[in-house]
Amino acid sequence: MTAKEQKELGDLLFPNTKQTIADLLKEYPLRELPPGAEVLRFAPSPTGYLHLGSFYSAFIQFLAARRTHGVFYLRLEDTDQKREIQGAGDILYKSLIDYGVVPDEGYRGDKLTEQGKYGPYVQSKRIELYNVFAKHLIENGNAFPCFCAKTENKSEIIKRREQEIANNDEIREKDVCRDLSFDELKTKIAQGLPFAIRLKSKGDGTKTREVTDIFKGKREVRENAKDIILLKSNGIPPYAFAHLVDDTLMRTTKVIRGEDWYSSLAAHIELFEAAGFQPLQYGHTPVISTVDSATGNKRKLSKRYDPQADMRFYEQAGYPKQAVLEYILTIANSDFESWRSKNPGTHIYEFPFSLAKVGNSNPMFDWNKLNDISKNIIAKMTCKQINKEVTGYFTGTGKMSAEDFTKMYAILAIDRETPKPRKDIVKYSDIPELYSYIFREPVKSLPLISPKAVHEYAKAYQHSDSKEQWFARIKNECEKNGYSVKDYTRDIRVALTGRENTPDLYVIMQILGNTEVLKRLQKT
C-alpha cells in the first residue's frame, strides 16, 4: 500500500479525527520537574477491592515519586466494561487515601473532580486520544483494520498454537486482514462492516530481544509475533494500546506493574517503537505469595481464598495503618528493618526508599512479621493516640457502651508511655476478648489453689487503698495466714479475671470498682 493510500485509509477509518500526535504532544508537554524526578502512576481497573499486591505497587511508586520530587498520579483503567463493578473506583481511591497514599494528581473518585493538567484520568473519557494514535499507526503502515468476527474459542486457539510450535517453534498470530488490498478495505468500510484496529507486527517469534527490567535486570524475551488488537470494534482500547497513549501523553517515566504483565513486554515495546516513541522503563513487581493449605504449594495471594489480599481486611481487623505500611516496606526494601531499629521514632517517609533495592524474588506473606510490627507500634502509642484509634475503630459497631469505652481507656493506659510498655495487643479487634474480664464477669475455668484464702481476702479488701497500702494488706494477710504471696495474688487474679496473666492487678481492681470486685471474690 502506498503512503497516499495509507493516509486515505486513515481518513476513511477515522473521518472525525483531525488532531495529530504532534498536536497532542503540544497539548500535553513535558513536565517542568527537577532533574531525576520520577513521574509514576497507579492505574487500577475498577473491578473490585484494592488487592494487597496492587497497593504494594502503588505505595512503592508513591515513595519513589516523593523522594525524587516527582509526581505520583492515579489513572482509572475502566475500559474492561464487562468486569467493571459499580463504585469500585471510589473504593480504590478511598483505600489509597486511608493509608496516606495521596496522589498528586488524577482520578479522585466518582464524586470529586479530577486534579491535574494531563487528564482526563479515566480511560473511557480518552477515546478521541486513542483514535489519534490509531490513525497515526494506520497512516505509517504499522496498523490495519480487521473485519474478522471473533469466532475462535480458547481451546481452538491453544490447539492452533501447539501446532505452530510443533511445525516451526514459532507462534504466528498474523491476522488475515493485514494482507487485504486498499480497494478491498475501501469496499468493506463502505459496506459499514464493523472493524477492530490491529498492530501490523514485524516481530519474529523465533527470535529474542534483550530487555532491561528495573527489578529483574537484563533478560532475553521472545519477540512479539502477534497482531495485537489496538482498538476493539466498539472503539475501546485494550490495556496495551491505552498504556502506550496514556503513559506517553501523561509523561510517565517508569511503568511499574504486576508480574503478570511481563509476558506482554515484547508486544508493548514493539508498539511504542511502531508509534515512533522510545519505550519506557519497565519494572514488574514481585508477587506476594502464600502456601496453599490444600496443596502445600506456593501461590499468589488470592482474592477468593486469602482475606489478607483485600486491603479492607486490615482496617476491619484493626491493624494500625502504620503497621501495614511498615510491613510492606520490609518486603520492598530489605534494609528497612535495620533502618527502623536505628531510627525507632522517625517517620517512614524519612527512610531512603529506592526502587533499585526492590528484590526480584516473590516474598511470602508473613503473619508473624506483620503481627510483631503491629504489636510494637501499638505498644509505643501514647494514651491519647491509642484512645483515638480504638474510639474510631469501635464507634458505631455496637460492641462498646459508654461505660465500656471508659473501662477500655483505663486498661489501655496500664504501663503505657513507659520505657518498657507491654506488647499484648496485636490488633484492635483483639481487645474485647483480650480484656473480656473488664467488660463481663469471666467464666472461671482455672482452679484456685485456695478458695478459702480468696474469701478471706474479700473481707479484708479496701477499695480506697493506694497501691502501696493494697500490697501491704496482701502481704499482711499472707503472713497472718501462712500463704504464699505468689499463690495468693494468683488466686485473686484468677477469681477476678479468669486468667493467670494480666496487666497490673491493682489497676484492674480499680477499673472494676468495689462492688464488682467483691461480687467476683465472694462467688469463688
Image (cartoon, grey):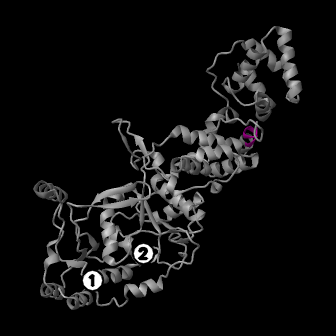
Left or right for 341, reference 466: left
Which residue is under mark 2?
A: 248
Secondary structure at badge 1 equals loop
Vertical placement of residue 275 versus 265, above or below? below
Question: Can residue 4 be seen?
Answer: yes
What range is drawn magenta here? 409-414
Residues under labels 1 and 2: Cα distance? 18 Å
Question: Can residue 318 be seen?
Answer: no
Quadrant in which the C terminus is drawn: top right
Which residue is under mark 1?
A: 140
Residue 411 lies in magenta, yes or no? yes
* 463, 28: nearer the viewer: 28
Dominant SS in magenta: helix
Q: Which residue lies furthest to the left in this view?
A: 167
Instruction: Please provide percent x and percent y for residue 464.
Output: 88, 30
Instruction: Please provide percent x and percent y for residue 502.
Output: 70, 29
Left or right for 432, reference 282: right
Instruction: Please provide percent x and percent y for residue 12.
Output: 24, 89
Q: Which amino acid does label 1 sit on?
A: Asn
Secondary structure at badge 2 equals helix
Question: Reading the chain from its start, which is encountered first: label 1 or label 2?
Answer: 1
Please give the name of the residue rendered at 23% of the width and 71% of the height, measured from the top-left corner. Answer: 201
Vertical placement of residue 389 versus 17, above or below? above
Q: Which amino acid does label 2 sit on?
A: Thr
Q: Which mark is residue 424?
A: none
